[in-house]
Image (cartoon, rainbow, N blue to C red):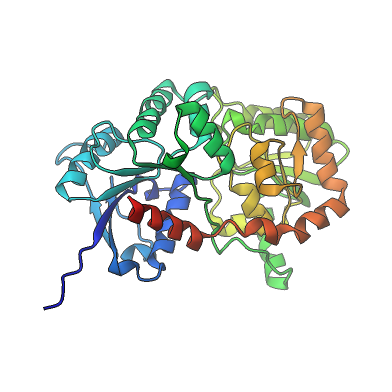
């Protein structure tokens, strides 16, 4: 009689896949898709995916390697705290999960099993110095620290983040490993075909973009200096009347300031120099990244910060903060802001990025060397090897 194959069961918290997706949700979707393509994975693992409200319709979730569950108390409205801190620990024991993977930076209060937790330095910053509501900062303070103490392994996404986390939490090097995120295949450099030129023309018309534009993306936490970028753009807007700044960022400043600032600047110039917009779907974002003059993503604290890398994959340079992380990723292949709070310095960098064609061409010629490390297949392979090791 053949020996029965015993699969290791990996639990994954998937609440961030539900609804509109931002950072964690987007990366988790790409990771799960990459896992389905890993060679021989069905011989070793089964994955139990836990959802709070609904199971999304993504094709990769239909793979036989995944068991999907919505977990909640009957008759009670869905609650993140109940889902995360009570139901996940309970179902981890009930379902006999071997290792649980938590992508959302925290370890549940009552979790008793083996865990791999994604932890990043920027979340530590938000918890202790950011502008999020106090209840969120308190949760991060408590349960990120709990993850650092209790998890079997901590995964982070850059050497810069690893070094800071070791300092913040007193982590030993053997407990933490670096695993760069990958990049989705749909981010790519588009041909300047008639179809693509017509498509970007329609998208620009939708947002009120008249000619050339620059943009920011992502959630506008205070540390990402979108307000300062708008003030810096104000300095160059008079000299560059054919340039607009598209800011489709959810304002996370406390209190919000971006809408009022955009209105003030636009009134000053008598035109829509700054365009505020809401959520942009990925199809439009690919076109906007491809045809922008450059992306602004100047952040005091990031663990990785994918948008500038995604822009580079589309052939578009980025303006970023000058720090250890951005130098780790880009070396010299970006435009660097040394002090984002110095609006004159910031404005000078924006002007430089608009005019230095030689530097732009150099950035584009070096992009493949930078993009090599951002590979979902390699990311999944490394994560699975950690599961095996544990």
Give above or below for 172 relative to 40: above
**Closer to the camera in the image, 235 or 171:** 171
Front residue (pair 248, 358) = 358
Q: Is residue 169 left or right of residue 79?
A: right
Say whether residue 122 is left or right of residue 370. Answer: left
The answer to whether residue 209 shows anywhere in this view is: yes
The x, y position of residue 279, in whole percent, is 53, 46
Q: Residue at x 72, y 36 (%)?
A: 322
Residue lying farthest bottom?
1
In percent of width and height, residue 358 lies at 87, 54
Which residue shows up at 59% across the image and 33% down it?
A: 301
Residue 46 falls in image quadrant: bottom left
Q: Residue 335 or 165: which is nearer the viewer? A: 165
Which quadrant of the view contains residue 277? top right
The N terminus, quarter of image: bottom left
Q: Is residue 246 visible?
A: no
What percent of the width, then of the height, locates residue 340? 72, 29
Question: On the picture, is 131 further left or further right than 291?
Answer: left
Name the spot of residue 97 as percent of width and height, x first: 22, 50
């Amino acid at each position: 009689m053949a020996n029965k194959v015993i699969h290791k069961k990996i639990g994954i918290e998937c609440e961030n896949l539900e609804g509109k997706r931002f950072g964690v949700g987007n990366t988790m979707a790409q990771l799960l898709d990459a896992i389905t393509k890993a060679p021989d994975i069905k011989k070793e693992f089964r994955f139990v995916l836990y959802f709070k409200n609904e199971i999304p319709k993504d094709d990769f979730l239909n793979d036989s390697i995944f068991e999907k569950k919505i977990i909640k108390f009957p008759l009670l409205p869905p609650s993140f705290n109940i889902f995360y801190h009570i139901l996940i620990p309970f179902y981890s024991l009930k379902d006999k999960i071997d290792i649980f993977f938590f992508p959302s930076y925290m370890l549940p209060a009552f979790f008793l099993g083996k865990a791999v937790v994604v932890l990043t330095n920027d979340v530590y910053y938000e918890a202790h110095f950011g502008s999020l509501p106090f209840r969120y900062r308190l949760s991060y303070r408590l349960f990120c620290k709990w993850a650092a103490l209790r998890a079997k392994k901590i995964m982070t996404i850059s050497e810069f983040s690893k070094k800071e986390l070791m300092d913040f939490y007193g982590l030993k090097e053997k407990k933490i490993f670096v695993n760069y995120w990958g990049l989705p295949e749909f981010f790519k450099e588009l041909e300047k075909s008639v179809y693509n030129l017509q498509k970007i023309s329609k998208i620009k018309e939708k947002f009120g973009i008249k000619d050339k534009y620059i943009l920011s993306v992502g959630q506008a936490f205070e540390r990402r200096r979108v307000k300062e970028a708008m003030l810096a753009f104000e300095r160059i807007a008079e000299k560059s009347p054919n340039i607009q700044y598209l800011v489709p960022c959810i304002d996370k400043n406390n209190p919000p300031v971006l809408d009022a600032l955009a209105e003030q600047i636009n009134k000053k110039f008598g035109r829509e120099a700054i365009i505020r917009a809401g959520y942009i779907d990925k199809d439009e974002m690919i076109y906007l990244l491809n045809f922008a003059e450059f992306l602004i993503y100047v952040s005091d604290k990031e663990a990785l910060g994918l948008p500038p890398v995604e822009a580079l994959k589309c052939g578009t340079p980025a303006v970023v903060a000058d720090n250890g992380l951005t130098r780790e990723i880009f070396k010299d292949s970006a435009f660097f802001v040394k002090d984002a709070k110095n609006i004159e310095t910031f404005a000078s960098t924006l002007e430089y990025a608009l005019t230095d064609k030689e530097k732009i061409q150099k950035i584009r010629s070096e992009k493949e060397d930078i993009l090599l490390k951002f590979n979902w297949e390699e990311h999944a392979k490394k994560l699975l090897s950690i599961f095996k090791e544990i």
